[in-house]
Image: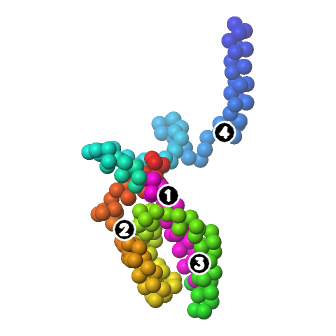
Amino acid sequence: MKQPILFLLLFLFIISKAFPQDTLKPTNQTQVVDGDTLTLVDLNAVMIFPPVKFDNKRQAVRFDRLVYNIKKVYPYAKLAGERLKYYKTVLDTIPLEKARKIYMKKAEKELQLKFGDQIKDLTYSQGKILIKLIYRETGNSTYDIVKELRGGFTAFIWQTLARIFGYDLRTAYEPEGNDQVIEQIVLMIESGAL
């Protein structure tokens, strides 16, 4: 008879040490239903992606390469979107055009020092994907961003230089069209599936 009581006391002691009292208290997110207290928990949305099927091994290799390229450039596109929002808010507070130009040149030099070598090391395919993902993150083409921040002539020069190397800064992002696979991969990265 004494053994079950000692066992129960020992069990309660272990539980009280393993779970401190503040974790045992009910949270504010509870609801009483028919006399039972239920804890309410918000869960993240779960995205279910269809399995990717390939007709041959070459398609599988191309898809894996696309995933690799997107994983490499997507952080730069996210950063570009965040920086653009930040720069726009700062530029809105600067009243003089000359001061804006000075600020943008300083910001450009800072970005060049921080990311210039990494961006220069991107492959041709990664550069094309980066242009599309920047459009996805900002809602504007790279050409429009350069035109807005640095002027039309500078945008024209960069577009001409890009065209020489096979890029187009006016490339739009079409998540329902040509870029459907890229959109699916990005959504998989964002949801943690990749």
Residue drawn at (46%, 48%) of the image: 194
Nearer the observer: mark 4 or 3; the answer is: 3
Residue, disc 3: 108
Residue 109 among magenta residues = no
Q: Crowding near pointer 2: few (<14 within 10 Å), some, many (20+)?
A: many
Circle nearer the viewer, 2 or 4: 2
Q: Main secondary structure of the magenta part?
A: helix
Q: CA distance from mark 2 to mark 1?
A: 18 Å
Few, some or many C-alpha atoms within 10 Å of disc 1 (few <14, some 14-19, many ≥20)?
Answer: some
Amino acid of disc 2: Tyr
Left or right position of 140 against 118: left
Q: What is the three-letter code of the residue carrying label 4?
A: Thr
Q: Which residue carries the number 1 mark? A: 72
- CA–CA distance in space, label 1 to label 4: 41 Å
Q: Nearer the viewer, residue 74 or 92?
A: 74
For the record, the magenta segment spans 67-91
Report the mark closest to the observer, 2 or 3: 3
